[in-house]
Image (cartoon, grey):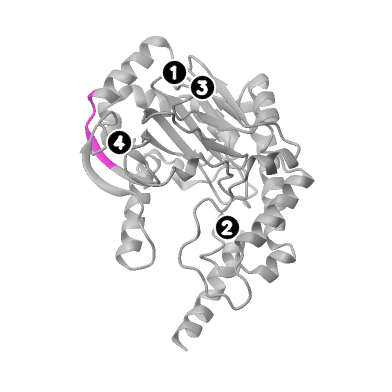
Amino acid sequence: MLSLARQSLLMPFWAAQVFSQDKFFARNPVLGNRWLNERGLHTRRVTWSFQMAERRRRRLAKLIPADDRAAFDRDGFIVKRDFLPHDIFLALVDQVRSLRAPAREMVEGDTITRHIALEPAVLQRVPAARQVVQSPAFRNLITYGGSSAAAPMVYIQTVISGAVPGLADPQTELHTDTFHPTVKAWLFLEDVAADAMPFVYVRGSHRLTPRRLEWEYRMSLRASRQPKQPHAQQEHRLVRAISTDEVNELGLPAPEAIAVPANTLVVADTFGFHARGPSRLPASRVEIWAMGRRNPFLPWTGLDPWTIAALGLRKPVFYWKSLDALEQLGLGRQRWRDRGVLSAFDPAL
């Protein structure tokens, strides 16, 4: 009875999340309802959010050069080599190497991902990073890619493969991050080799074609719970994974590993199929990493309170602390564990 009463109380909240960025089939019995998804709930969310993103991008088109816009629209990602002036890039690398700051880490398979938030106290010590995050070229590419002027979360990110015993890193599976256009960006501080965790992307897979929508339908049914099946507490990782055979069936090209030199910026729509390339040997990668994601059903491009500098620069820290609080209340799980003061270039502990 308590469980039924709890579900009744939460049902309006779960139903309202249909019109949010929430993507978890297993945590929401409305989004994960097989009967509803058989009748098109998920595919309607995908279609509507994609249409809204296209409209917002048309209004944001003037922010980036026409050739950049054409490349992004065609491929789903853009590669900008020698992004920073040489002297600024060298200063950035030196300042990041000398920085020791509060860090969080997440373990996936045998891989550790470390984040140092680029919040005000860190930016005071890494002024070259401030130049990056405030650069119109950096922000405008992310804005267009994410179809929103909302403030992204920006970190110094370290990825260390083969760092702990475990299964293969699930991020090496081709997948789409969520059900709507969204953006991630990587400014690599080191060369990225083809056999050491390069960014992998399927060109053109960010477009919503009839075959892609059919894949979304099939995926939603696989992810939905069967009638009378207990509601899951934890969604399987990478429920949106896709095999290379399925990629071929969608009429898409083979995945492409993007091996690039240091000082290259990659901005990608992670509605497209992408992955972290596998590493032949244990390896590490350090970068300035940004993610932008907002409610995909909003018709406007701005009106984001996080664009206020005093708030936006602290967004990653607020995010961590909110997850800490939810875990303490028994309402969630914090995957980003506090690791104390570290350097981005420190090896795995």
| Circle nearer the viewer, 4 or 3 | 3
Say what amino acid the circle numbered 4 marks. Pro
Mark 1 — residue?
A: 263
Say what amino acid the circle numbered 2 marks. Ser
Residue found at x 50% / y 30%: 139
Label 3: which secondary element: loop
Query: Label 2, label 1: how many angstroms apart (C-alpha)?
Result: 35 Å
- In the rendered structure, the answer to whether residue 101 lies left or right of residue 280 reads left
Label 1: which secondary element: loop
Q: Position of residue 310 (x, y in %)?
A: 35, 41
Mark 2 — residue?
A: 20
Mark 3 / mark 2, whichever is N-terminal: 2
Query: Label 1, label 3: how many angstroms apart (C-alpha)?
Result: 12 Å
Given residues 82 and 348, the one toward you in this image is: 348
Task: Classify 10 Å Cα crowding around label 1: few (below 14), some (14-19), many (20 and above).
Answer: many
Q: Position of residue 330 (x, y in %)?
A: 34, 68
Mark 3 — residue?
A: 259
Given residues 314 and 321, the one toward you in this image is: 321
Mark 4 / mark 3, whichever is N-terminal: 4
Query: Label 4, label 2: how many angstroms apart (C-alpha)?
Result: 29 Å
Given residues 153 and 198, the one toward you in this image is: 198
Q: Position of residue 40 (x, y in %)?
A: 73, 62
- Report the residue that reaches farthest toward the top: 86
Magenta-highlighted residues: 98-103
| Circle nearer the viewer, 1 or 3 | 3
Q: Are marks 4 and 3 in contact (CB under 8 Å)?
A: no
